[in-house]
């Protein structure tokens, strides 16, 4: 077929685009869309697999049960606390590691390779490492504590260890993202700033940070959305004992130990809604910061 | 002065190395400890032994868990790559309405809290007979690997020279032939990198594996480890768990170090350019 018209070509392209995207799009829509709708339906029912005969539509009663539960709000508090504290530490520590990886004059390849190792470790495997490190008698870190202390059996120390495990494993990812952002800062601008007498800290704060703002925001968004899902570390370290459950842990226990699909689904829906708020806030934040950047440059 | 700066950087390097390697060394050291010496609390073993490794490979549940992890991971990766390559090609190269919807959907799913899927999938899979089967885990794994695949691959695809494809179509190739004969070979390195990232994602999963299985029929290795008990109630499973943790970590660390440069660019491409 010689002499195809341009519009024919455009139509072909459009059809090919749809065909190529259809399988992936359908799988993603089906596997998330159907369960989300299904969990909304389940959340409106009394449905406990231990008492299947008592299944009934009960409107929003499950939401009332969950939203008045102290366990639920405690889990929300733990999730927010762990997310905020660990992402804040990761940002600072990740930036420091990124600067070392990017700027170091010695053994740069070795440092960059080593940082990938925590990223590569299976989360559950690393969590067991931390658990045994803090187990009295067994652990090398527990050895530094006063005799008789068992940090994983007390609430605040346990939360601290959960944050430590989370930070250790995910900071490398943060620093890789930030290092890629550092590479976008032009050397000439830094040199010019140095010539004008700016100190290293001033160059970092006034030149590097503003230029990296989009990268930092993207990295923060990725990590916050990942951190609120925290499950593996808590499951291994405390399994939610001493009021250290995150929302994922408490929903899991309602499902697998409680076999209560109604309550479990209600929690699923609430987590989904809660997490959906984060990117909305971020888009607002990004939207607010973008014009400022334009003025700055 | 130069020597001074080098010394300062060497010190900072050392701090980063300690940060990255000491916790890993601890797990490895734990896995080589004679079970009776575990509670001594020393960092390095006082008595070295391979018995923990020998023990876990005699444990049918763990071996089965490894087989499940490898099988489910490879199948999920293959499916995600097949579907993701097509979609990423379309997103990177073609202009069609709905292109942004595909990207938006991928972004949405990559942010999706997995726990919100676990409860409904538990019930849906029970009814469909998928609970505690390989397909029962492959389905969510493919779904969560797809956004990563589409994003990473479309970034790789954008870097491939457009003109070669145009030249092929000018020579009479159909758009599909241009895709298969010109772009796929050029894109292969990107595809391999993405496949590794997708495999790591599946291999690392714990939540789906522990929620959607009830026996070693489909339970993957990370979940199997959490069920480890000593061979008697008086035997502590610490050494076995540490050995198993090392075993499931080694393949990923080898992958990551072998493909270091590509993996870093794959991981960061979406966030920095996108």
Image: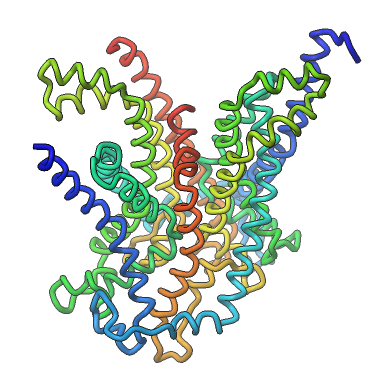
Left or right, B205 with respect to B51, comes to right
Residue A262 position, x and y percent, is 58, 56
Left or right, A99 with respect to B256, comes to left
Q: Residue A291, relative to residue B111: is it above or below?
A: above
Residue A145 position, x and y percent, is 16, 71
- Quadrant showing the C terminus of chain A: top left
| Residue situated in front as seen by the camera: A33 or B215 | B215
| Residue situated in front as seen by the camera: A278 or B73 | B73
Left or right, B162 with respect to B274, comes to right
Q: Residue A65, relative to residue A145: is it above or below?
A: above
Q: Residue at position x 24%, y 69% from top?
A: A151
Residue B35 position, x and y percent, is 36, 86
> Is residue A61 at all visible to an observer of this figure?
no
Quadrant housing residue A47: bottom right
Q: Residue at position x 43%, y 26% from top?
A: A283
Q: Residue at position x 37%, y 41% from top?
A: A176
What count of labels does the image hold? 0
Q: How is the image coloured?
A: rainbow
| Residue situated in front as seen by the camera: B122 or A148 | A148
Quadrant housing residue B235: bottom left
Q: Residue at position x 32%, y 72% from top?
A: A132
Residue B253 position, x and y percent, is 45, 58
Q: Residue B211, relative to residue B273: is it above or below?
A: below
| Residue situated in front as seen by the camera: A38 or B84 | B84
> Is residue B6 at all visible to an observer of this figure?
yes
Q: Residue A181, relative to residue B111: is it above or below?
A: above
- Quadrant showing the N terminus of chain A: top right
The residue sitting at the right extreme is: A1
């Amino acid at each position: 077929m010689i002499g195809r018209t341009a519009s024919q070509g455009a139509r072909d392209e459009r059809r090919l685009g749809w065909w190529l995207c259809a399988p992936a799009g359908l799988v993603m829509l089906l596997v998330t869309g159907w369960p989300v709708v299904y969990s909304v339906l389940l959340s409106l029912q009394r449905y406990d697999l231990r008492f299947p005969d008592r299944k009934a539509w009960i409107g929003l009663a499950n939401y009332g049960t969950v939203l008045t539960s102290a366990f639920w709000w405690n889990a929300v508090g733990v999730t927010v606390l762990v997310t905020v504290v660990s992402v804040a530490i990761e940002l600072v520590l990740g930036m420091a590691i990124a600067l070392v990886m990017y700027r170091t004059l010695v053994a740069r390849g070795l440092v960059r390779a080593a940082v990938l190792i925590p990223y590569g470790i299976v989360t559950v495997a690393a969590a067991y490492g931390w658990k045994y490190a803090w187990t009295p008698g067994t652990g090398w870190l527990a050895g530094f504590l006063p005799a008789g202390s068992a940090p994983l059996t007390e609430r605040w120390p346990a939360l601290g260890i959960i944050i430590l495990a989370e930070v250790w494993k995910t900071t490398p990812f943060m620093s890789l993202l930030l290092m890629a952002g550092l590479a976008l800062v032009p050397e000439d601008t830094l040199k010019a700033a140095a010539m004008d007498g700016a100190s290293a800290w001033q160059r970092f704060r006034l030149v590097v940070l503003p230029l990296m703002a989009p990268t930092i925001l993207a990295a923060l968004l990725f990590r916050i959305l990942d951190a609120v899902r925290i499950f593996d570390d808590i499951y291994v370290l405390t399994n939610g004992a001493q009021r250290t459950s995150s929302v994922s842990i408490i929903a899991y226990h309602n499902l697998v130990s409680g076999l209560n699909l109604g309550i479990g689904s209600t929690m699923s829906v609430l987590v989904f809604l809660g997490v959906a708020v984060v990117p909305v806030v971020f888009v607002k934040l990004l939207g607010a910061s973008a014009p400022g950047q334009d003025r700055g440059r | 002065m130069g020597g001074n700066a080098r010394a300062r950087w060497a010190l900072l390097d050392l701090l980063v190395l300690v940060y990255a390697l000491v916790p890993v060394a601890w797990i490895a050291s734990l896995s080589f400890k004679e079970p009776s010496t575990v509670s001594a609390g020393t960092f390095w073993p006082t008595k070295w032994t391979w018995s923990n490794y020998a023990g876990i490979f005699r444990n049918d549940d763990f071996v089965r868990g490894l087989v499940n992890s490898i099988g489910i991971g490879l199948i999920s990766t293959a499916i995600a790559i097949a579907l993701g390559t097509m979609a990423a090609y379309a997103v990177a190269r073609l202009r069609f309405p709905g292109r942004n919807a595909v990207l938006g959907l991928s972004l949405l799913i990559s942010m999706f809290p997995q726990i919100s899927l676990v409860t409904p999938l538990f019930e849906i899979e029970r009814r469909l007979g998928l609970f505690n089967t390989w397909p029962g885990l492959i389905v969510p794994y493919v779904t969560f690997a797809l956004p990563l695949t589409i994003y990473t691959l479309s970034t790789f695809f954008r870097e491939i020279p457009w003109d070669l494809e145009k030249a092929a179509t000018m020579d009479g190739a159909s758009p599909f032939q241009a895709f298969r004969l010109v772009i796929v070979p050029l894109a292969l390195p990107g595809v391999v990198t993405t496949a590794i990232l997708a495999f790591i994602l599946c291999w690392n999963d714990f939540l789906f594996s522990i929620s959607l299985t009830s026996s070693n029929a489909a339970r993957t290795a990370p979940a199997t480890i959490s069920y480890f008990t000593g061979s008697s109630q008086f035997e502590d499973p610490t050494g076995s768990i540490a050995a198993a943790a090392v075993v499931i970590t080694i393949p990923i660390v080898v992958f990551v170090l072998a493909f270091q440069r590509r993996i870093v660019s794959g991981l960061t491409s979406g966030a920095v350019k996108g």
